Amino acid sequence: MLDPKLLRSDLDTVVEKLRIKHYELDVSSFSELEERRKSLQVDTQNLQSERNSRSKAIGEAKARGEDIQPLLDEVAQLGNQLKSAEAELGELQDKLDDLLMGMPNLPHDSVPAGDSEDDNEEVLRWGEPPRFDFEPRDHIDLGQGLGGMDFECAAKLSGARFVTMSGDLVTMQRALIQFMINQHILEHGYTEVYAPYLVNEATLTGTGQLPKFKQDLFHIDSENHNLYLIPTAEVPVTNFVAGNIVEAEQLPLRYVAHTPCFRSEAGSYGKDTRGMIRQHQFEKVELVQVVRPENSMAALEELTGHAETILQMLGLAYRKVVLCGGDLGFASTKTYDLEVWLPGQNTYREISSCSNMTDFQARRMKARWRNPETGKPELVHTLNGSGLAVGRTLIAIMENYQQPDGSIRIPDVLQPYMHGKTEIRP
RNA sequence: GGAGAGAUGGCUGAGAGGUCGAAAGCGCUCCCCUGCUAAGGGAGUAUACGUUAAUAGCGUAUCGAGGGUUCGAAUCCCUCUCUCUCCGCCA
């Protein structure tokens, strides 16, 4: 959520910045709502004030043993007036809240303009895409050849966009998770955390998935439960600090979690229908940071670097892009995408997305820290990034480390996690 | 699943229709005293919103959440959420 004060004090700037994210704020209707709210709030509070002072007078009169009936007659009408004023104000407030909750975070000044992912700016390329003296296969071919990857079996069990795996491929997925988490806790200073995979509406509202993106989520709506499957560990883990006031010396909080992620992928019909690129269920290692506001831009660089380290250690060529305004996520002020080279597609594909949410989520979650300079609780800044998307990393390794006979060489850093194995063969 | 108890400020914990944004203690801040240390004395110490030049004043809201009763609710009633205890079941 944006700072309502900013909307009141500098609406023009907000409108302009929202436009960069392709959000058109209806200024006149917003201003009108805001004006009505203001005057109605003053009226309502005056009525409340009058009720309070009169009630107090009644209490005092009663304590003195006086007849309070005349006083009661005087306030007879006040109750109804107040009730209708409060009801009207509440309605207005709800409308404003709805509007506010649907407004995206403002983009940072360093974010390039643009409409779509085609306008994202490349920041750097790392590594050389491998050269093959044979026609490289994609992970689907490779997986079927190895016998471990089965989309038909998954379709039988669940439908489209699921996969079953068996054998060394699964072991490698587990190895990747272990390797990534260990790197982050041992070298990058993160604390490993465990969190629920099912969360409530408040939690999803806190990070910004609700109310706007309900169609992207899997919903458990039974007699006794109203829960959602997490689309990313960002949701439960960022919400660790919801409602809290964190002591200054505890910041920054750095959390790493491995969870499965569940996405309905509504609206992506026909996109990446083949293979493991876009699934309803996938594994991800997620980095979350909760930091002092003045540190969040630096923390974004740092966190992105942590994700990059994983790619580098795995020897996977990638490029780093900064998302343009039009491609930037709802809650993010600035996002770096890391795109890994996939020989099967002959292109770079997203494998990590690292974002600074500034105080946007913190305001929704009421997550604060005590600023020693002011002594007051102030909103924290939150960040998150994939470190990395495990399913896609598995694909990337299969395609980049394939050998002419369809076998897969296992990257050095993963071998200790795979009983010293060096290759995956049928 | 059955029975019961509870949710109050940064923390502990009183309050059981009226002057309660809320006693007391702890913690924290400032001041005094003190040669260091320890101890002591005094004052202050929630958040959001509105009004405002103002972090000054004033007003409003907030005692788990949401409704209700009442002139007036932390306190009474209803619904929900969560926590704890006992029993049952269970990876």
Image (cartoon, helix red, strand yellow):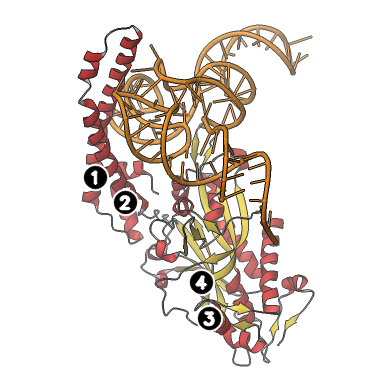
Residue type (three-letter) at the residue carrying disc 1? Leu
Q: Mark 4 — on which chain does it sit?
A: A
Q: Nearer the viewer, residue A412 or A197?
A: A197
Residue type (three-letter) at the residue carrying disc 2? Leu
- Residue where numbered disc 3 is placed: A155
**Marks 4 and 1, Cα distance to the nearest angstrom?**
40 Å
Residue A158: assigned label: none
Residue A33: assigned label: 1
- Residue where numbered disc 4 is placed: A280
Q: Residue at x 56, y 82 (%)?
A: A151
Q: Mark 3 — on which chain does it sit?
A: A
Establish whether labels 4 and 2 are both on one chain.
Answer: yes
**Marks 4 and 2, Cα distance to the nearest angstrom?**
30 Å
Residue type (three-letter) at the residue carrying disc 3? Ala
Q: Are marks 4 and 1 in contact (CB under 8 Å)?
A: no
Q: Mark 2 — on which chain does it sit?
A: A
Q: Are marks 3 and 4 in contact (CB under 8 Å)?
A: no
Establish whether labels 4 and 1 are both on one chain.
Answer: yes
Q: Nearer the viewer, residue A233 or A105?
A: A233
**Marks 3 and 4, Cα distance to the nearest angstrom?**
12 Å
| Circle nearer the N terminus (2, 3) | 2
Q: Are marks 4 and 2 in contact (CB under 8 Å)?
A: no
Residue type (three-letter) at the residue carrying disc 4? His
Q: Residue at x 44, y 50 (%)?
A: A360
Can residue A343 be seen in this snapshot? no
Disc 1 crowd, CA 10 A, few/some/many (<14, 14-19, 20+): some
Residue A4 lies, with reference to residue B58, above or below; the image says: below
